[in-house]
Amino acid sequence: MYFYGSTGVNKNGNLEIGGVDAVELARQYGTPLYVYDVALMRERARGFKQTFDDLNVTAQVAYASKAFSTVAMIQLAEEEGLSLDVVSGGELYTAIVAGFPVERIHFHGNNKSREELEMALDHKIGCIVVDNFFELNLLKDLCREKNANVNILLRVTPGIEAHTHDYILTGQEDSKFGFDLQNGQAENALKMAIENNFFNVLGLHCHIGSQIFETTGFLLAAKKIVEKLEQWKNELSFVAKVLNLGGGFGIRYTKEDEPILPSQYVREIITEVKHLTDQHSLKMPEIWIEPGRSLVGDAGITLYQIGSSKEVPGVRKYLAVDGGMSDNIRPALYQAKYEAVLANKPLAKANQTVSIAGKCCESGDMLIWDLPLPEPGEEDILAVFCTGAYGYSMANNYNRIPRPAVVFVENGRATLVVKRESYEDLVRLDLPLK
């Protein structure tokens, strides 16, 4: 097995996370259960920040909270000195409840509502990333109504395609996100923005995709943007104070994945931006990045109780667990792949190949195909690795299945940070017919 962060095998022969026995966690808190290795999340955050500090570059490392947003997680991001990206009123509200410093909150999204923008303005958040002309005009009207000034970035699509899954490509020309850099949209948006006295246009933002294992796409995006910034300096007297190159830094889900270190992403991006700005006689802007998955993805492990099994002779053996697409929809949505072990015998030799089925009434509810495992029993606990990003945040109540609890583990201590939903919770907002 591949050991992530503080995972290992304890003296009882069980999987251990953050110094806590995974089998005991399952017994205490029930399954399915999301478990987060806090030390690994801290390590990832510090790895990004330290590289900027080492290179003496002014920067903001903003946690992309869409990956995993809870009050405890936002408070952890604050402890590590991160900024915060939110993409909805709900994520913004979570950040406010968590007590996160509003001046370090950045608000993204391609269809922000009037109410969401009003919330952002009322709380005087640090920056709004404007995505389209509709939003630009709506925000202008709201600022005038409230006599409020606001920092903005303009999101642009630089025409760069990252090497990733089609469903999570966001930087190419045909995208629902941002102003196109090539067809004049971005320039028109910039003219509108800098002419408005309520807007302080800090600079530009782009995001080229997710689960990216190389820096080429980021460097090409930077090149296209800096070339435009030189043009706009000469033609519009606009000088960008901030260049936000987004996130999308990849992690290891299976042995086929070969991510690079956070420090390598940062070093190569900084080196290229320094070179480009020198080449085009521009002042080096403040660099912002937005890691989400790369901060929390491999820090999360989901624990399941083994249930029923079915063997189709000569075809495959199915092994069912007590969760599935209700707590991890990524395999069904993205064909995402994972690795897993039995938490109560992680080092036992695999003697069969099974496919892990979820319990939802849906033929596509399969978590892992063709997983090598030792002979499982009904009391065994399956531990699926790298579920920290987009597991809890995309969890749902399909089949009226309650969402799991979330536990943080660190230095031998477990802390419940999200309670398990109950059946009563499922009907709490329902109203009777009569």
Image (tube, rainbow, N blue to C red):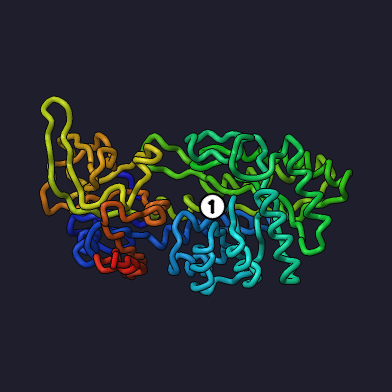
Q: Position of residue 152 (x, y in %)?
A: 71, 58
Q: Is residue 390 above or below residue 225?
A: below
Give the amino acid at mark 1.
Answer: Pro
Q: Residues within 10 Å of mark 1 (few under 14, many from 20)?
A: many
Q: Quadrant of the C terminus?
A: bottom left
In the rendered view, does 308 fall on the left or right side of 226?
Answer: left
Residue in the image at 47% along x and 41% along y: 259
Q: Position of residue 1 (x, y in %)?
A: 29, 44
Residue in the image at 83% along x and 51% along y: 238
Secondary structure beneath label 1: loop
> In the depicted view, which residue is nearer to us: 297 or 423?
423
> In the depicted view, which residue is nearer to us: 368 or 195?
195
Whether residue 50 is visible to the viewer of this picture, yes or no, is no
**Among the 4 quarters of the image, the one containing residue 351:** top left
Residue extending furthest top? Answer: 314
> In the depicted view, which residue is nearer to us: 401 or 369?
401
Q: Is residue 36 above or below residue 321?
A: below
| Residue at mark 1 | 291
Q: Position of residue 413 (x, y in %)?
A: 32, 70
In the rendered view, does 424 fall on the left or right side of 183?
Answer: left
> In the depicted view, which residue is nearer to us: 222 or 260?
222
Q: Is residue 405 above or below residue 211?
A: below
Residue in the image at 55% along x and 59% along y: 86
Q: Is residue 385 above or below residue 99?
A: above
